[in-house]
Amino acid sequence: MREGISREMALLESYERQARSTGAHVLMLPTTSPILAAVERLGLRPKVDAVVGRRSRQSTMVPADLLAHLADNRLMSDARIIVFTDQLVSPVDAPLLVSRNGRTQYVSALEYVLNAEYQCPLFAMNGRQLDYLPGNSPADRVLNFIVDHLDANELLGEAWLARSLQIQRQPQERRFQQRRRVRAMRSSIMHMVGPSRHHWDTSHEDKLRVLDDLYRGR
Amino acid sequence: MNPDTLIARLIATAAWPLRLLKKPSERIERHLGLTLGEVDRRAVLRACARDGTTIGHYYHWYLEKLLVARRLNIATRSGLLELVKATDASEFEALDRILDNKRSAVLALPHFGHYMLAVLSIVSRYSPTRDVGLFYGDPTTHRGNQVFDDVHASRFNTPADARIHVFHANRSGMADALRLLRGGGLLIMMPDVHLKADETYLVPFLDHAYDVMLGSAAIARKTESALIPMLPEPTGALRFKIRFGEPIDAATHLQGAAASAHHAEWLDYTATAALFEQYERWMSGHTLLWQYVREHFLREAPFVNLSPKALDQIWPAFFADPRTRSNGEPTPIILSNPQVEP
């Protein structure tokens, strides 16, 4: 673990040197214990303007929070935004379906929006190296950059704390969870209409028809 | 009493003090061949807290299951029937009254207690006079069901057993089961299992939402059969008594065909929810004897009870939620990987 932290710290120190002359930018980090520890040890957190990830983490914003904030506030010229891209897996946070080398998955749109709309360069910690993409890059390069980062995370093995979340990027898993959600609502409606089983209350037929369509993927 | 049954009864009785054990014991689990992880143990302890029992009850029950499983594997036909006779204290008068007019019935039996012995009890009592079927998931997809196939094929498949049937849950099995019920038969179904979790419905059950299929209720409705909940309750060491509930008639409220597919679906849903309400009342205090107790008490999500007003309030947000909206089969953005390009 100590060696791990040292390596992560060396990379983060390298990032610090490059970032000083970069202006507003995004740093994409994988969710691992050494990274979280290194971020704390370098005192990076007080220097960043936002940490974006899934909502369950304290002091973490979700992409919608950040974008809402940026809609109302100008992006500071030296803003630093840390994004835990590997945590952005839900249909809300990862809406873009991309396919590369036969692998199809949903990825987040936040990095692209920040790169295209706010001209933020992207840094990404990919295994043992720090990769860089200039602001306002073509969309396919940004998406490739995100996929490269996720692929690099795959090589982290057991250390990658967000590994179990990644199944949510798969289209078939999305479909499965969506159908589960629709069935749960359907069950709640069916249960609400009971328990008087002598009379079928037709007032919910419209909603059930909507659920039929959603369940069938229409 | 058959010596093997007697020995099993003696072991179960001698092990009764196991039930006093309040804390998990890896040593006992090892002796039982029980592999409980920390998460499983937590689930069992939650069930114990709900029941007001101890984990020792779970160990003792597991031992009983092992004793019965061993007998099911090796006992002869007569040995099995003798085992049922020695362990089953069921009274069938109430069920006989319901079935008196030769009405067909779906007997809905969850995987609880000595359910295998309960099946044998029903089969041995009723198959001399009417067709009795057991409907279950194909062992190729429900591995645990192989035992049903084996017991039937090796010990209940003689010419004298012509009225005993087993049906796998597939198209032809369903057609055969419908035929059996339309001919006045009894069909034992196990409503607490499912194959595909995105095809289930949820019902409130033992503090959480539980995934169910509506098959038992639907088949009862389609054949105008009585839907009868049953549960083998424990009454002592290697002893049980089957409880039969009042019929939950999915069909009789219909007065003809369902007004719509949604109407039929609702009838089946409410009948299934009523089944599980009944099971919850019966199982309370003994939930450890339910085969799926571990999986169930790992669940966190409660059943969401909605009022019409709450439904109207949340409906727009539910409908607009990206987790609810299906984007069908979206076309992915094809990326060429710059690293592998020539």
Image (cartoon, rainbow, N blue to C red):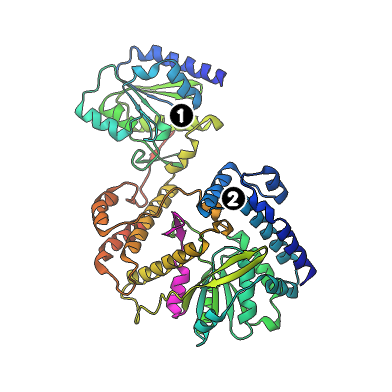
For mark 2, name the chain: B
* Mark nearer the viewer, 2 or 1: 2
For mark 1, name the chain: A
- Rate crowding at label 1 as few (under 14), some (14 to 19) or many (20 or more) other CA atoms within 10 Å: many
Q: In the shown orientation, is residue B234 left or right of residue B259?
A: right
**Marker disc for residue A31:** 1
Q: Residue B163 falls in which quadrant of the image?
A: bottom right
In magenta segment, residue B223: yes
Up/down of A9 relative to A62, above or below? above
The segment highlighted magenta reads B202-225
Q: In the shown orientation, is residue B244 left or right of residue B256?
A: right
Q: Nearer the viewer, residue A188 or A25?
A: A188
CA separation, marks 2 and 1?
A: 40 Å
Up/down of B150 relative to B58, above or below? below
Amino acid under label 2? Thr
Q: Are marks 2 and 1 on the same chain?
A: no
Q: Residue B123 falls in which quadrant of the image?
A: bottom right
